Structures are given as structure tokens and as C-alpha cells.
Image (cartoon, helix red, strand yellow):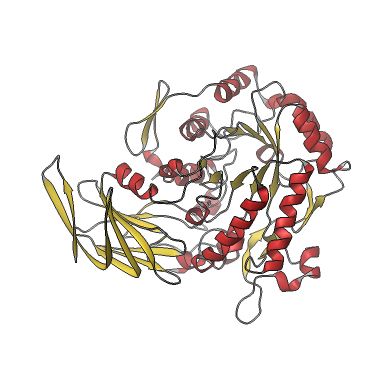
Amino acid sequence: MRLEFSDPLRESRLEVPVLAEALGPVPGGYLLRGREVRVFAPFASKRFFRHGWQSWSLTTWVDLTFPPKPLFPEARRPQADDPFLLEASEWWGSGLGAFEGPDGKVLLLGALGVGARVLGREDLLLGRYAEGEGEWFLGYGDRMEVFAAYGRLLPRRLSKGPPRLWCSWYSFYNRIHEALLLEVLEEVAGLPFEVFQIDDGWQRALGDWEPNERFPRGMAFLAERIREKGFRAGLWLAPFLVTPDSPLVRAHPEWILRDGEGRPIPAGFNWGKPLYALDSGNEEVLDHVAGLVRKVRAWGYDYLKLDFLYAAALPGAEGEVRYRKAMERIREEAGDAYLLFCGAPILASLGLADGLRVGPDVAPYWDNEDRSFWLQDPTGPGLRNALRTTLHRLWLRENVQVDPDVAFFRSRFSLLFPEEMRLQEAMGEMTGFKATSDPPSWLSPEERERLWAFLSRDKEVKPLGPYRFRVGEEVLDYAFLL
């Protein structure tokens, strides 16, 4: 069949051949249905919108004349993207894909269910669900309008504005302890933050979510001190991730996600150790995770950063239905707590997360070329990687509070130039999600003043194109990131 897209302003139309069951028109395009759909673009496109699987996965426009290169080392692949996407010799996207036409308009095919992938090949968009049939959206037109039309058909959860956040990670990483956090808490008390979030480093081990010896008075004690300063207490968890030497693995080896031959499915490599995933389809695992959420809520934490969530969906798109059921259980247990999903399958998280990280971790440097160039890994920490992927997911702002990660204001312990820091600061203005890890004692008077202004005043943001924005009186162009 052929579907017609018209442009009344230009008195033009475009006919697109499609192999799928047509369900009818919707604003901005058409609904389709099928396990597999094929859309034949009436033009040859060199640029394909490649949407990565989870928060850190590469999301940008790619050149179809250059096939994807393998990411190294192989042990990192499970925490970088859907393993299928990384091992394919052609460009596939997670859940959606799009072509750019010769006139700059976009032809987009996007899944409306979980567990789908889209291939881009010259004039063919091929969409396929990993399991069963599902619905699709097909749209054509102005880039921003087409992505917005697709987003309106996806789940949404928009609570009140994103909180102003201080997070411990990008200043101290996992070298935190009780006395240090109490010291910083005193420093930030005079600034307009709303959440004080403790990141990785408080726990005994992955899977052993009790405070280690550096937190002698426990996590409930710290939550109470945070609330006394007028902040909400935030805590980092990686609920579905373990290492082989975790006490939880020794106690419950049957909880580990395994392949058909009984071998643990690799979940990546971090903290100098290989990673395993807990089986999110195991009811005992879900009871364990639900109990963890209840425990930290009882300690007094009502802002939870849930990290490395892709582990609950491995080995990829095939696990997204299982992932979504698991996260629905967590959402129910968390009640009115603010849930920030990180390292999370993007489309499968919509409607459940309050906030969603949409790019790799930032860092106090622009890029790690040893990793991004020589190892072909665009998912590692670095401001360039974070900005590029976040930029191409800004269209999700009507579905979820988009987290671009923290902004930097410090010159101390930083390799960033001021203009690079401004690009990330502007991302906070665009998304409304304003966070930093800078301890006020590290800031000069001018840097502290800029942080205060960032937290206390919202600048007007006006899109001037796909990559140009007016933020307050300043015009910023991100096109060089492509």
C-alpha cells in the first residue's frame, strides 16, 4: 500500500510505499501494526537517526555510507548498548529510526510498544519487534514536528518541575564518607538546592545495600541531617547489578540471569570487576528489590537514583517486557518518591520514571580520545559524549523530565574551558533539570555567583533550529557535535 503525506503550504505531497497493516491516520502521520513493517522511502538518504537502547547509548544522525565499527573491549558492550545493535554490521536503532530527505524533512518510523528495533538501509526503514506484534507510528515532515508527533503517542509521566540537585559523584566519586558529606551539607545549606543526593560509595557492595564502615551512624542518620537542612534526601542504588564476589551471589546463585546453557549473562565491566545481572523475571528477585526500596524509603530517602537499569532488561530488546514489569513493581513500592532512572532502556522507561538520564555521564573534561576514538566507544564519560546524545533526545521533554546530568561551575579539578561548561549549563536551562556536584568551597566568588543564578532563575529558551538555541540573551549552536 501507499501512504500519502501532504504539505498544504508547499502544495506538495509524498507517497510512501509500506508493507504493514494500516490502522489509520493520527495527527502527524499514520498508525501501523505488525511484527515486522517495511517502509520504502521515495528518496535515497545518506543520514539515519540512530537511537541507542539505553541512557548512555549513542544517539545521533549517522552516515549510512559508513557502517558501524565494533566497540571495544567486548566486556563493556553489555553496558554500552543493546548487544544486538553493537554486533550488527548495519545501522539499527532501538525503538525508532528516521531518514533525512533531500529537503531536510524527516521520515520517522517509531514503535509504540517495547522491544523493537529499526534498521536503516538506503531507502528502507525496517521495523521489527523482538517478540510478538505491535503498533508503529510513521510520520513525515519537519524534524521537530515529526518527533513531537511520535512523542505524543508514547507514555508520559510529568510531575512538578525537576528538583534543584546537589550530587556527590562528580566531585568525590566513590570516595565518600559520613564526615565529608556532613561538611558539604553545611556548605550547600545556603544555596537554593532542593535535593542532596548521596551517590555510589556508601554501600558495602553491589547487592549488599547496607552502609559500609565509612558511615558508622548509618544512612537513616544522614537522611535526617539532610532533612534538617530543608532538603530532600537522595540515594543512589543499582538494584539489579551484582559482581561475582557479591554476598548476594553466594547466597542466591539461582537469582543470576543466565543463558540457555546456565551460564551467567555478562552485564558489563566496572569497578575493576565483571558484572552480572539479577533475573528481573524471577519473583524472588522482585521481592528482594521491592524490599530494598521499602528499606531506603524507611531510612528517609524520597529521591532515588536507580542506576545500571539496563541489567534488568538484558540481553536487549527481548528483555524489555520483563524490565517494564519489574520497574512497575518498583514504581508501586516507591510511592511518591522521585525516581531518576539512569543507564535505563529509554522507551521502556517512559511513564514510570519521574526523571530519565538521556546521555552518558559527564566529566570534568571534554573527551577521552583513547576510549572514544581508538576503542570506538561513544558511551564513556565525557562532556562531548553527554551533550551529543542528550541533544538528540530533547524531544522527550513532553514525556519525562529529561536529565542531561550535572553542570560544572568550578575551575578547580577541571579540564573544561568556560565555553564548554556553558554548553552543559544551557542544557540545564533547556530541560529545567538543574544539578551540580561542585562543593561550594571549591568555587571562586564569581563561580559561586553563577551557580546561584543557575539554581535560582530560569532563562527563557527559544529553539532557533535543530541545533541552535537562544538561552536568555545568548545563542548557542551545538551542530559541531554531529
In the rendered image, residue 81, in percent from the top left (x then y), is placed at 51, 60
- Residue 108 is at least partly visible in this image: yes
At a point 64% along the width and 74% down the height, the residue shown is: 258
In-image side of 298 versus 49 (left or right) = right
Closer to the camera in the image, 291 or 411: 291
| Camera-side residue of 272 and 2 | 2
Does 186 appear above or below 392? above
Residue 152 at what x, y percent from top left? 38, 47
Image location of residue 57, percent across then percent down:
50, 54
User: For the N terminus, which image quadrant?
Assistant: bottom left
Residue 394: name its quadrant: top left
- Locate residue 144: give its quadrant: top left
142 sits left or right of 395 in the view = left
| Residue reaching furthest to the left | 11
- The quadrant holding residue 453 is top right
Mark yes or no: residue 76 visible. Answer: no
Q: Residue at x 56, y 40 (%)?
A: 405
Residue at the outermost bottom position: 261
